[in-house]
Amino acid sequence: SEVRLIGALSPKSTDGGGESAGWPPEREAKAVLERLVQGRSVDLAFAAGRRTDRYGRLQAHVLVHAGGNREWVQAAMLAAGQARAYALPEAAACLPELIAHERLGREQAAGLWAHAAYQIRPASQTRELMRFRSTFQIVEGRVRRVAEVRGQVFLNFGDDWRADFTGLVKPAGRRRSGAARPDFKALEGRTVRIRGWIERRTGPMIEVYDPAQIEVVEGAGAPSR
């Protein structure tokens, strides 16, 4: 069986605008993954929801047996800069921990973080964001206004909601199991990062499945811990 590492998005050649299998971050990530798991026994931990993706691959967290201990493969890949943390609906429970491991690799400019293709995108560069629609990105900017319309929360990053970047939080994304309801209104005037797939909804937009997709940035570009 094939296993998809949920929560850790590995680099692909298309990230660099090409179709070649020779994309260096992709080759490096594959080599690191092989060193972690090849020839070893692993345990699989499944999230709530579907256990397989549309290609029939198992979706799981992978724990590899090493020296009498178990190592979380997703965490190791993220800390080494070989993947980006992401969330899917019904599979976001570990996202805060995954982002914490990702931060280790990002702060050291390790792996994919050394490539311009994976830079954090400014929310103000709307036209550039539209070029990246249908791709996974991390977007940073100051929230100008938070609006709630028919149960949906809109994080507006510009004065013109019809054209500027927006974060959309649908009702299902406004809560986490066992957690208090986030105060999205408190994000007004704060600089945040939102991660997800960019869609075109008048302007560029990222849908928030889980509040952990939103990181509050403190000071000079350093994410809060």
Image (tube, rainbow, N blue to C red):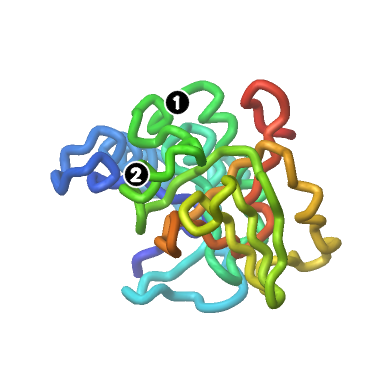
Residue 223: image location, x then y, percent: 66, 32
Residue 186: image location, x then y, percent: 81, 48
Circle count: 2
Tell me the SS state at disc 1. Answer: loop
In depth, the one of 179 and 158 nearer the eye is: 158
**Residue that numbered label 2 is attached to:** 11
Residue 47: image location, x then y, percent: 60, 69
In depth, the one of 182 and 69 nearer the eye is: 182
Residue 33 lies left or right of residue 164; in this view the side is left
The residue depicted at 31 percent of the width and 42 percent of the height is: 30
> The residue under label 1 is which amino acid type?
Ala
Tell me the SS state at disc 2. Answer: loop
Residue 180 lies left or right of residue 40; in this view the side is right
In depth, the one of 72 and 23 nearer the eye is: 23
Classify the position of the C terminus by image quarter.
top right
Please identify the residue farthest to the right as the structure is shown.
Answer: 180
Q: Residues within 10 Å of mark 2 (few under 14, many from 20)?
A: many
- Where 123 sits versus 87, above or below? above
Residue 39 lies left or right of residue 145; in this view the side is left
The residue depicted at 43 percent of the width and 70 percent of the height is: 58
Query: For the residues marked 2 and 1, what is the alpha-carbon distance in whole angstroms?
Result: 13 Å
Q: Residues within 10 Å of mark 1 (few under 14, many from 20)?
A: some
**Numbered circle sitting on residue 110:** 1
**Numbered circle sitting on residue 190:** none
Q: Earlier in the sequence, mark 2 or mark 1?
A: 2
> The residue under label 2 is which amino acid type?
Pro
The residue depicted at 68 percent of the width and 64 percent of the height is: 153
